[in-house]
C-alpha cells in the first residue's frame, strides 16, 4: 500500500489568494527610500496620489542635465531645448492591470506648469525607462511588482491581489 501511495501523483496544491492594500503614504515612503538607496540619474523626487478608477497623479522633480550626463544621448537633440536643467513634471495617468502586468495611458501632463501633449510625455518616459537598469519598454505591458496579479485604486489606496504557493 505504501508503494502505491508513493507512486500515485500528488494532489495538486491550490494557490493561496492574498488580498492586501497599500496606502498612498506607504507608496510615497517607499519611493523616497528607494530613490535614496538606489538613486536614478536625474530623478530627484517622486510622489503620487491615488484616486478611484485606477487614476494616479504624480509629481516628479527631474534634472534632465543629470539624466543626459549619466547616459549621453538619452534625450534626443530636438527635445534638449525643452528638457534641460531641473524641471517639475506633473503627470496624471490611468492604468489597467491584468494577469501580473499593467498598461497605462497619460491623461494629462505639465512640465514646469506648461501643458504638454500626452504623446510627447509618453515618448520622454519611454526613452527614460529604456535607460534604466531594468530596461523597461513602456510600449508593452509592464510587470506588476512583488508577484501582484491584479491591482486597482481607491481613494488614496492601492488594492492588490497575488497568488502564493499553496
Image (cartoon, helix red, strand yellow):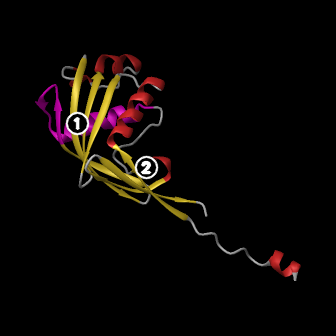
Q: Residue at x 44, y 30 (%)?
A: 34
| Name of the residue lying farthest toward the bottom | 1
Q: Residue at x 65, y 72 (%)?
A: 12
Q: Nearer the viewer, residue 22 or 37?
A: 22
Please name the residue that numbered disc 1 is placed on: 121
- Residue 3 percent across, percent down from the top left: 88, 78
Is there any visible trace of residue 77 in the rendered image? Answer: yes
The magenta segment: 108-132
- Residue 152 percent across, percent down from the top left: 32, 55
The quadrant holding residue 7 is bottom right
Element type where label 2 sits in the image? loop
Q: Is residue 99 left or right of residue 118?
A: right
Badge 2: residue crowd in 10 Å (few <14, some 14–19, many ≥20): some
Element type where label 1 sits in the image? helix
- Vertical relation: 84 (above or below) 137: above
Q: Residue at x 18, y 22 (%)?
A: 82
- Vertical relation: 113 (above or below) 51: above
Please name the residue that numbered disc 2 is placed on: 144
- Residue 66 percent across, percent down from the top left: 34, 17
- Residue 140 percent across, percent down from the top left: 37, 49
Q: Is residue 136 left or right of residue 82?
A: right
Q: Is residue 1 left or right of residue 106?
A: right
The quadrant holding residue 36 is top left
Badge 1: residue crowd in 10 Å (few <14, some 14–19, many ≥20): some
Q: Is residue 35 left or right of residue 64?
A: right
Is there any visible trace of residue 84 in the rendered image? Answer: no
Q: For residue 99, which numbered disc appears in the image?
A: none
Amino acid at each position: 500500500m505504501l508503494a502505491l501511495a508513493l507512486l500515485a501523483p500528488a494532489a495538486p496544491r491550490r494557490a493561496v489568494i492574498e488580498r492586501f492594500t497599500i496606502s498612498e503614504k506607504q507608496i510615497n515612503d517607499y519611493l523616497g527610500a528607494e530613490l535614496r538607496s538606489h538613486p536614478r540619474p536625474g530623478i530627484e523626487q517622486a510622489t503620487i496620489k491615488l484616486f478611484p478608477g485606477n487614476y494616479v497623479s504624480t509629481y516628479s522633480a527631474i534634472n534632465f542635465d543629470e539624466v543626459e550626463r549619466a547616459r549621453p544621448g538619452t534625450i534626443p537633440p530636438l527635445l534638449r531645448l525643452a528638457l534641460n536643467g531641473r524641471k517639475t513634471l506633473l503627470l496624471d495617468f490611468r492604468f489597467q492591470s491584468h494577469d501580473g502586468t499593467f498598461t497605462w495611458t497619460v491623461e494629462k501632463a505639465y512640465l514646469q506648469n506648461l501643458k504638454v501633449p500626452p504623446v510627447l510625455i509618453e515618448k520622454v518616459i519611454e526613452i527614460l525607462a529604456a535607460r534604466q537598469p531594468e530596461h523597461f519598454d513602456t510600449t508593452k505591458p509592464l510587470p506588476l511588482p512583488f508577484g501582484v496579479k491584479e491591482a486597482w485604486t481607491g481613494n488614496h489606496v492601492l488594492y492588490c491581489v497575488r497568488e502564493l504557493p499553496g
